[in-house]
Amino acid sequence: MSARVSTALVLGAGGLVGQAFHLGVLSALHEAAGFDARSVDVLVGTSAGSLVAAALAGGLSAPDLAAELIGAPLSAEGRRTRAAAGRSVLHLPEQPAPAPGRGPLAPGALLAAARHPLATRPGAVAAALLPAGRQSTAPIAQGVRRLHPTGWPERDLRICAVRARDARRVVFDSRPGNGERADVGQAVAASCAIPGWFAPVRIDGETYVDGGAHSPSNADVVLPDRPGLVVVISPMSAGRAGLRADLGLRLAVRGYLAAEVRRLRRAGSRVVVVQPGPGDLQVMGSNPMRGEGLGEVLQRAAQSTRKRLERTPDLLAPA
């Protein structure tokens, strides 16, 4: 078991809209509570969250990433980081989903899941049985590589994906045997490869798809580290939600997240979960891949977070 770390930040899946939610929450935490997401001990990212985590690990602050999203000027520090990295597109493409291919991506995943039912999730099996998407993740990988030209960062960055052939979660990081298989760009591209939308990513002879197929949060990745504080931002769940098109999905995601949080708390971690409330959901809509209105999503998430901090000033105190 590894030594206990102080703080872990877990950034969940959620598409373009989820990425805007992440940046609204993180920029508010940075500005109102002094929580600089770049300084945490462990960064975990899944799908859209992996892009944000990679950008933070590359030195860009949450306020600068938020400014980029809405077209506002960056800080002097952000401009220097961008100048060193060159043009680095760190967002999901705003294109409609292309027509998927024919036939299941990995039909053998069903048999593999039957052999090891406790190690696989229904969503991951379904993802492996969907036809392969056709939109390339190459722009994602290239953008991340420009920010990480020398490979994995020194900080603890963990990127979650799903291996198609057996529907098992794989965590890419800089540890021997993990970082050697994939560079940061490949890992993030794999984590973002939404089944049926993006083309799966080949790494070291294996095919990978979106880590959100296993869990949209994957907060249990930090369980062995026993962090004093775990901050989980979960754009795809909801604390409270009325009748809406994506209600069933959000309730399912909340169930996965709740189980992960219980395990972390039993291990002694203080866990702070940030998920959309009714006001956030109103502007987020039910299509996570829509490209319009992201500034409004970001601003509403920041406003909701500031209000929560006003009610609970010690929100981010460790256990």
Image (cartoon, rainbow, N blue to C red):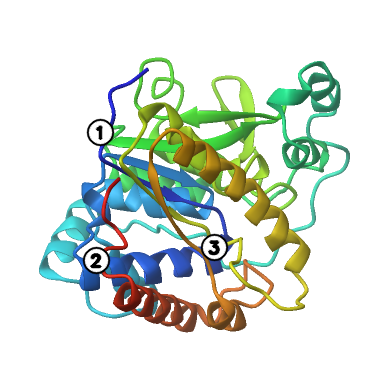
Q: CA distance from mark 3 to mark 1?
A: 31 Å
Label 2 to label 3, Cα distance in Å? Answer: 18 Å
Residue at horizontal 28%, vertical 80%? 72
Q: Residue at 25%, 33% (x, y): give it.
A: 150
User: If you read the primary sequence from the N terminus, does the residue marked by circle 2 or circle 3 appear first?
Assistant: 2
Please tell me which of labels 3 and 1 falls first in the chain. 1
User: Quick check: 50 left or right of 278?
Assistant: left
Q: Answer yes or no: is residue 79 visible.
A: yes
Judge whether 11 appears above or below 178 on screen.
Answer: below
Where disc 3 sits, the SS reads loop
Marks 2 and 1, how far apart at CA:
27 Å
Please provide percent x and percent y for residue 53. Answer: 37, 49
Q: Residues within 10 Å of mark 1 (few under 14, many from 20)?
A: few
Above/below status of 32 relative to 148? below
x%, y% of residue 208?
A: 62, 33
Residue marked by disc 2:
30
Seen from this angle, which residue lies furthest right?
A: 103
Q: Where does the C terminus fall, quadrant-wise?
A: top left
Please tell me whether residue 180 is drawn above or below residue 304 in the rendered image. Answer: above
Residue 184 point in image, percent of width and height:
39, 37
Give the quarter of the image for residue 102: top right
- Front: mark 2 or 1: 2
Q: Quadrant of the N terminus?
A: top left
Instruction: Say the numbered circle drawn on residue 235.
Output: 3
- Hey, what amino acid is under mark 1? Thr
Name the kind of residue labelled 3 in the image.
Answer: Pro
Please indicate whether residue 268 sits to the left or right of residue 135 in the image: left
Query: Residue drawn at (47%, 42%), measured in percent from left and top?
Result: 188
